[in-house]
Image (spheres, coloured by chain):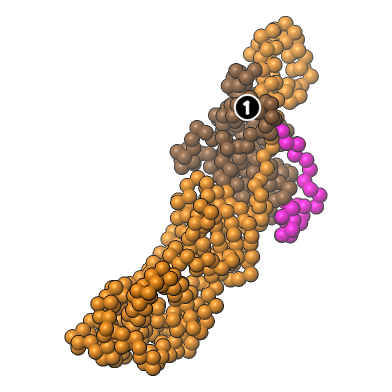
Amino acid sequence: MTCTETRDLFSALADDALTPGERAALDAHLAGCAECRRELAGLLRTVKLVRAMDPVHAPAGFVDRVLAAAQPAPSHRRLVRRLMRPWPTLPLGAAALLLIGGLAVLLFRGSPEQQRAAHDQLEAARAPSSERNVAAPQSVEAPPAAVTAAPRSDTDLSKNYSEPPKSESMRAKTAAPTTKTDAPSPRARAERAQATVPNASRDSVSSAREQEAQQRLTPPAAMERREAKRELADRGQEALAPAVGGRSAAAPSAAERQPPPVGAATPAPAMATAKAQAMPQSAPLSRTGPMTGIPAAPPDVTARLRVAHVSGAERALIELAARVGGRQTGRRIDGGRLVVELAVPRDTYAEFVREAAALGAVSIESQATDRPMLAVAVTVSN
Amino acid sequence: MREGLGADPPGLLPRLRAGDPRAFEEFVIAYQHRVFGVALRMLGNRAEAEEIAQEVFLRAHRAIADFRGEARLGTWLYAIASRLCLNRLASPDRRLARGDDALMDVPASTPDAAAAAERAELDAALRAAIAELPDDRRLVLVLRDVEGLSYEQIAEALALDPGTVRSRLHRARMQLKEKLERFA
């Protein structure tokens, strides 16, 4: 037996996998070859080193994540997901754009009701008649402009702000349709949006007035109150969404998933104010936007995601939430770590967890899946 | 090295086939470390290893009704894990993303106070040497010397002839020996 043939048997020798014949030939060669004995000693040492490596253990929570991911999604959701796989959010986005476009056209055309409301408002404010036709579209097209423009007509608009009977009737008018119909037609929705325009304009102006007055007194406190009010309006809007869209909280409307669109944002303050009075506690989710500074409600699920790149993972999480029918509800820094807050439908939660695990090491710290829409807080870190 | 792959937990396979969710949980608990271990040693990244390990169990969950039971459940899982790891390693994205420090976040062996530094250096060299092995050789080495499978079980899991397993293992070990010579 040559040295090469002998050394080819070393590995099998380490595993006691040689036949008696091979073993005898090997021993005979080794007895007379010091070089092969050194080689064999080196190989056996290497094998021993590898075998001394500690066995690896799966990370904590691995079993739970596998079990969650193995839960089958309802068949209708699987079908929808399959149909939308190439562009998961495109159809919803397109529908939302069409709806917003339709609303914008209707608003620009104007209805008698809208004109009458605008007229009443401007009459009350004693504004010059030449501004009448401009007021409503401006507030629809660019709400921030209405807010920032308010101080310029400070004295005139203060009267509008101090007319409680008219504003109450307006509020009633705005709130009524939302409770009457569960599934309004697009046209009904458009009409409702139109009906809220004067209110929106008035509320924007009023809130601007209020903001300025508060800032004159104690600016920091006023700022806080304003943020709190904005948060309340946000919650109100969210609570109102199911009634407006005729959908449950588990299925947020397509428009909600889009960035605040032109025109769609304008009715929010009026609707929100009306609804916030009726059901301020019913907002199902933590809604801690980046500007609110208001702590989140306890989430249903808290998780940690360890990744190489935090910002990339944040984007991926938000996209993932959208893919499974959810959305981002907030973002905050907690103890120097980024916390991404998401709303995820319970039906697609398992899929969410499974795909989140593809982004990095996921560990679920707490999990309650009682509600149809789960508030999920994910701490993303390196 | 992990203990050799023993017999399947008694009665588990029929319950899995019947769709018993508790059986699936037992199944994952029983094999999670083995599956994750292979994935981590092959991929060198904990996040990626967990993703693959999870996918292994999900595929097993979907295919359990078609599992004929000719092999052990553990061998079957190793087969799925091996295939998924090799596919992942062969993907173009993965080749670009993979750096030279693959396997570097595999936890080191328990450091002993006195020899910690020396041991850490050896561990690092060992991991690097394993990471540098060709994928097919590394897989055989991991299955044999880390996971404790027999030649026959490896041959079954990888659909290879036992002679091929033996020769691949030999080449992998000899290659490692060359790289670790300075620690001899």
Disc 1 target residue:
B117
Label 1 Cα crowd, 10 Å radius (few <14 / some 14-19 / many 20+):
few
Say if residue B106 shows up in the picture.
Answer: yes
Relative to the observer, which residue lies in front, A95 or B184? Answer: B184
Residue B74 percent coordinates (x, y): 71, 44
Horizontal arrangement in the rendering, residue B147 relative to residue A363 (left or right): right
Question: In the displayed image of the protein, which residue is found farthest to the left?
Answer: A130
Q: Is residue A42 above or below residue A203?
A: above
Label 1: element kind: helix
Q: Is residue B85 above or below residue A175?
A: above
Q: Amino acid at mark 1?
A: Ala
Relative to the observer, which residue lies in front, A239 or A210? Answer: A210
Figure disc tally: 1
| The quarter of the displayed image where residue A346 is located | bottom right
Horizontal arrangement in the rendering, residue A225 relative to residue A297 (left or right): left
Residue A22 percent coordinates (x, y): 74, 17
Name the image quarter holding the N terminus of chain A.
top right
Residue depicted at 42% across the width and 61% down the height: A87
* Magenta extent: B1-27
Residue depicted at 61% across the width and 24% down the height: B176
